[in-house]
Amino acid sequence: MEIRKSFLLLFAFILIFSHSIFSSEKNRKKDSSIAEQDGKIAGNVQNVNHSDDANIAVEDEDAEENWQFLEWEEEEPEFVLNYEVIVECLNESKKQYFELRRLKTESNVTKIQINPLLEPGFYRYKIITYNLIGLAEVESDWFEFEIKKAFRPEINDISSAVSRSSTIFLEEMNNGIFNISGKNLFKVRESPDDTVFTSYVLESQKKLNPIHLVPKILEYDNRYRHLKIQFDINELETGTYNLVATDASGLKSMLDKKNEITVKFKKRFDFDVSGGYTCPVILYDNTINEYLGSKIWPLSLAARMSFIPFKESFGYFGLGFAGSYTRMAASFAGYDIEGKLITGHVLAVYQIPIRKRIKNSAHTRHVMTLELHGGAGITAFSELKFLFPHGIESPVLNSTNLSVLAGGAVQLYLSNRLYSEVALDYISAFISDMAFGMIEPQLSIGWQF
């Protein structure tokens, strides 16, 4: 029985050893072919932020997590226990390599980070493959690589080419061009082989739905200290932004006031008040026309006010109130009818201001505002009564009804604050015993506070 066990163990060892020799030959061929594909590094050195022929060595905890990785390929990982990586450094004065460190993977994973990180210089490495019984089986050729120093970008100033300031007012004209000054402001990456480059992005400080805008680079400085960039001004919403520069290694410029852009309106909010003439025209039903003999009521006044606290580049939003007063009166054979029609509605308001550039200036003048509004309120018939000869009067009719309003307006600015307004509103009231709908054309004068 002991002889049989010894024989089985010897047979298993011969099989494993034979497979090791076969795998060794295959891996030698594989490593040789990889070396032929790419002269220096053959794709075996990987750096997340650089092309394969360069790594980075600078102290920065966040960026270092992605630095100095070696990665290779393995055709039959199921027959590999682990790998050993030998890294040697070049002594430039003696023109000789000396062993710097040995690294081992914990499994057959084909990727390892050099830790601690290497300093800038010239290096080479080779990989030793260990088979399933822990014997060194394949030793690759030496592959040379270079560690380059990384330079943290710095942005010391940013200003609009038009306003010479880091603050942009959306009421003013702006071409979206900014002048940047700082250090290590390299060119953007132009090809996969670039190892020194910088990316630029404008990031909003909003926590919800942050905006990231990539600028168009208009001009570089040969000393990499100045930069001219451009954004689409229509993509800049109100808020505060930081221009972030990131070098090839992942080092980022600091977030501070020096690289901050503020986009806002000169006036935080608007308050508009207007008043003028209106002439209600009753569209339906025919009840008013039957009893009072008319659908048009010219003895009327209208007033409107709007509070606009929310301003964006695509329009302004706010709340408003619209009211009207109409004197209703009619005379017939034997009696008269008189009363009042009063409306009042709370509105949601949307405005689009239109500005015109002042000649030879970046400043603009507010020439017009287009407005849409709508809301709910009341339509009331007040003190409506019949008047008969000899001072006889019918009981007074008062009726207050829920109603809705929808309309629009155009404000033509005569100065920066004074404007004339043309508006048209449609009102529909919910009255139990009749359908009621009318339009109110309006002509008013207003002032923006």
Image (cartoon, rainbow, N blue to C red):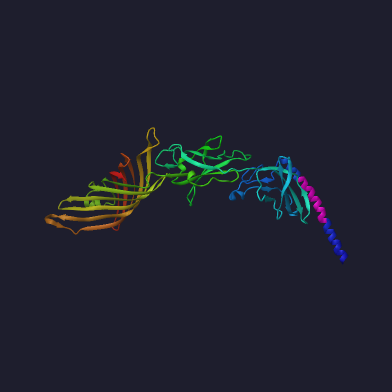
- Residue 229, placed above or below residue 10: above
Would residue 225 be visible to someone looking at this image? yes
Q: Is residue 155 left or right of residue 238?
A: right
Give residue 141's position: percent from left, percent from top: 75, 44
Viewer-side residue, 383 vs 63: 63
Q: Main secondary structure of the magenta part?
A: helix
Q: Residue at x 47, y 50 (%)?
A: 206
Viewer-side residue, 183 vs 326: 183
Quadrant position of residue 2 = bottom right
Q: Is residue 130 left or right of residue 198?
A: right
Tell me, yes or no, whether the highlighted magenta stretch contains residue 21.
yes
Tell me, yes or no, whether the highlighted magenta stretch contains residue 378.
no
Give residue 70's position: percent from left, percent from top: 68, 48
Which residue extends farthest top?
360
- Residue 247, placed above or below residue 15: above
Which residue extends farthest left?
390
Give residue 111's position: percent from left, percent from top: 68, 50
Which residue extends farthest right?
3
The number of numbered discs placed on residues in the rendered structure image is 0
Quadrant position of residue 81 = bottom right
Viewer-side residue, 429 vs 278: 278
Give residue 250's position: percent from left, percent from top: 59, 46
Query: In the rendered image, which quarter contains the N terminus?
Result: bottom right
Which residue extends farthest front?
93
Viewer-side residue, 57 vs 287: 57
Would residue 38 be visible to someone looking at this image? no
Looking at the rendering, the stretch of residues picked out in magenta corresponds to 15-30
Q: Residue at x 14, y 55 (%)?
A: 388
